[in-house]
Amino acid sequence: MRSVRLPRLAAAAALVAAAAALGGAGPDAAASPLGDPVLDRAVFLGATSGQPAALRINPAAMTLGPEGTHVFVLGTGALDTLRVDRRTVDPDTGALVGGPSVSTTIFDPMTSLGGAIGIYRVGQKFAAGVQCALPGGDVFPAEEGDLAYHSLGGSHRELALCALGGSYRPSRAIAIGASYQLVQTRLHLRFARDTALEAGRDPDRGITSDCAGAPCGFENPAATETYTIDATTATLPSFESSEFIVGGIVRVADGWWLGVAYQLPLGLFLDPVQLTGTVDVTRAPRDGGDTISGEVTVKFLYPDRLRAGIRGRVTDNLEVVGEARWENLSRMSGYDLRMYGLELTDAGVPEWYVRPRGLHDRFVVQAGVEQVDLGQRVTLGGRLGVQRGVTSDERVSPLTAYPLEVTFDAGAQLRLGHAWVLQAGYGLGLAPSVDTGRGAYDPLDRLACIDSGYDFDTDACAAVRAGYALPTASGVYARTSHAFWMGVRYDL
């Protein structure tokens, strides 16, 4: 017995070492308020899948996995491309005019790459597991200049310090489960601010003032300040660092399973999540171009999510799979920034600044086929899906460029001997071009609000309070996404 266990323990140790190497790219990679861009849609996963990732998708499904103790390592990656054919606003007439075309690749190795390591055990009635996860996050476009007033780069991510959970199967036809995850949220946000626009028509500082010998107008580099914000939540257990998932699964017919899982938001509906950190402001060139620093508090509401799935055999070795997901993203209207410090006050930096995201609820549906794992060497699967955009067309911006998307995902499993299982997948997402029209972001609203004497009953001042009175985001947007994942499981 000892001679058999030692090689298995050595293999488990090798997996742990591999996971450490995978995470060595940096612990900063993690999930975003828009969900995990890879695992949310991957083949072989979902609300009815007994795979290791079930702990963070539907813990009740863990009991559908193979009995025994399993160690696993998972790696993920995402890369997107974004094209924006911009329009700009003429400050004299207010008319939209053609602007530059921008193409950018959205990838950050510290956030776009992720992974997980864990161990779980499945019995006849109980299953339990623990894992540390570094899922990929929400990366913002880092294109300088033309997109700067909405995004100069950064990311929103979560570091899952610890996740543990289990499931109970009172009968062969039903199972329930729950998991808890300790999460630290990290926000790195960079953007530009048009100081001439925000001074209105003031002859000394506004759009008619001098910028290198000419009226500043809109989006003049000489009047542009840049902001770099780094903020995190506390890592100690608290409401805003606690994430709960509850789920159930039931056999509705012979060979057919229905699963449902609900994820509570960070903050547990009680209060907005609060991050604290630092802000560095690089003054506009006309103001000297020096960098000053202060402190920042960022508040926002996290979404909750509901997922349902069905899986059933149509032949002896083929299953059909359906997944549906609702994400309550409308809770997260934007980032509420409060910046403070003597240097910032002396420089006239606004104490309160809102960075809107303009999200609304997202709905996702997927359908596909997968071969049944009967112990064969190779198992294949594929899915087709549609994801509703996370914002209305007029609120699309470089910071929130997620229009309607059609997704295609494929996966393969390779069994290497009796104990090793290798899985890999690729997903392609295609978003048809979306035209924002004039768009919700309009610098004329800022001017109109100032001209009204800040009459908060006007629509223009409402746009200022919500953060939309910025340089325009009007244009035509097109996005393509690529998702990759690979996992290794060792059955002890």
Image (tube, rainbow, N blue to C red):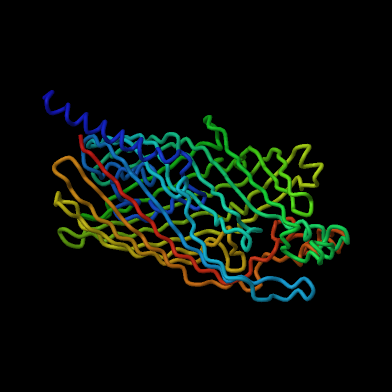
Observer-nearest of 320 and 204: 204
Observer-nearest of 240 and 342: 342
Where residue 199 sits: x, y (%)? 82, 58
Furthest residue toward front: 213
- Residue in the picture at 56% in, 68% down: 84
Count the marks. Answer: 0
- Judged left or right of residue 444, residue 255 is left
Quarter of the image holding residue 275?
top right
- Judged left or right of residue 275, residue 83 is left
- Residue in the picture at 31% in, 55% down: 425
Residue 448 visible, this angle: no
Relative to 64, does residue 320 appear above or below in the rendering? below
Where residue 490 sits: x, y (%)? 23, 39
- Judged left or right of residue 476, residue 129 is left
Where residue 233 sits: x, y (%)? 57, 37
The N terminus lies in which quarter of the figure? top left
Relative to 25, does residue 201 appear above or below in the rendering? below
Quarter of the image holding residue 152?
bottom right
Residue 272 visible, this angle: yes
Where residue 16 sits: x, y (%)? 31, 33
Furthest residue toward top: 2
